[in-house]
Amino acid sequence: MDARVQQCVVATLSARPAPVEVGPFVVGVDPTTTSPHINYATPRPGSAVTAADVTALVAAFRAAGRRPRLEYVASSAPGLEALLTAAGFVVEARHTYLVCLPDTLRTPPTPAGIDLIEPRTDDQRAALIGAQNEAFGGEPEATPADVARLRRQQEAGAVAVTAVTGSGACAGGGGAAPPAGGVSEVAGIAVRAPYRRRGLAGAITAEVTRRLFATGAEVAWLEAGGEDSWRVYRRVGYRPTGERLYVAAD
């Protein structure tokens, strides 16, 4: 499973608007944003990596005007962490990723007064992104580039779900990347503060995952941001599977 998830990350970065190939690495460059959470690199699973490869990777980031940063499944490149730290990189985090399969998915009820829909207009996309930004401490309003990015992802097969109240307000939402090799990452599960503690996060996660499996995906994976998220994801059928590393340089 580690190799499948890592290959999914490679495919996701390769689908960025301006990906860069550097030896065994793929750097997912998006010219519309400098966010390190979008512009980062990952190794191809099973590739041999040398110190020279790391030096070339740093140079590629500098040339693109981006901060050198990687996200990857630890087992996919066992010696990479030592090479990176020797080159001045610092481990930002080690996260356990969780996996859900079609036969483990559990769908909780959606809270009363909430509908889970696919955003089909740019106004709906902007509302979803705004709710995610609010939940994760980003800028409160979506930029035109943010909206265009989500629209482009949906056109490529990504899943997006918005939680809408009876009055039309966006209570939260989430999404999943276009499947690669039958595998997709679920991410951005967010609930605005007034709508929390009602089971909405679990309902959104399950709906995103259900729609993902309906496209033919075989594996959904995600990471939990804390104990509360961990419990939510476990309840809808996700199970701990492997470790991912987040590593960056100044």
Image (cartoon, helix red, strand yellow):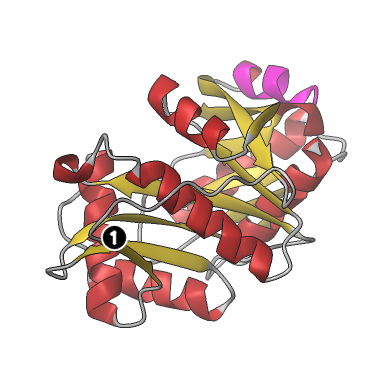
Count of numbered circles on the image: 1
Q: Is residue 6 toward the left or the right of residue 160 in the image?
A: right
Q: Is residue 180 toward the left or the right of residue 95 in the image?
A: right
Look at 43% across and 43% down and name the residue there. 202
- Residue 170 image point, x, y percent: 21, 61
Look at 49% across and 58% down and name the residue there. 207
- Residue 172 image point, x, y percent: 28, 54
Q: Which residues are magenta?
A: 77-85
- Residue 14 image point, x, y percent: 65, 62
**Kind of element beneath mark 1:** helix
Is residue 24 in view from this perspective?
Answer: no
Look at 62% across and 58% down and name the residue there. 12
Please say whether residue 22 is one of the residues in the magenta stretch: no
Q: Main secondary structure of the magenta part?
A: helix
Foreground residue among 58 and 217: 217
Mark 1 surroundings: few (<14), some (14-19) or many (≥20) residues within 10 A = many
Foreground residue among 62 and 196: 196
Residue picked out by circle 1 = 129
Foreground residue among 157 and 195: 195
Image quarter (top left, top right, bottom left or bottom right) of the N terminus: top right
- Residue 197 image point, x, y percent: 26, 34
Is residue 93 in view from this perspective?
Answer: yes
Image quarter (top left, top right, bottom left or bottom right) of the C terminus: top left
Q: What is the three-letter code of the residue carrying label 1?
A: Ile
Residue 21, above or below 125: above
Occupied quadrant, residue 13:
bottom right
Foreground residue among 109 and 238: 109
Look at 24% across and 69% down and name the residue there. 126
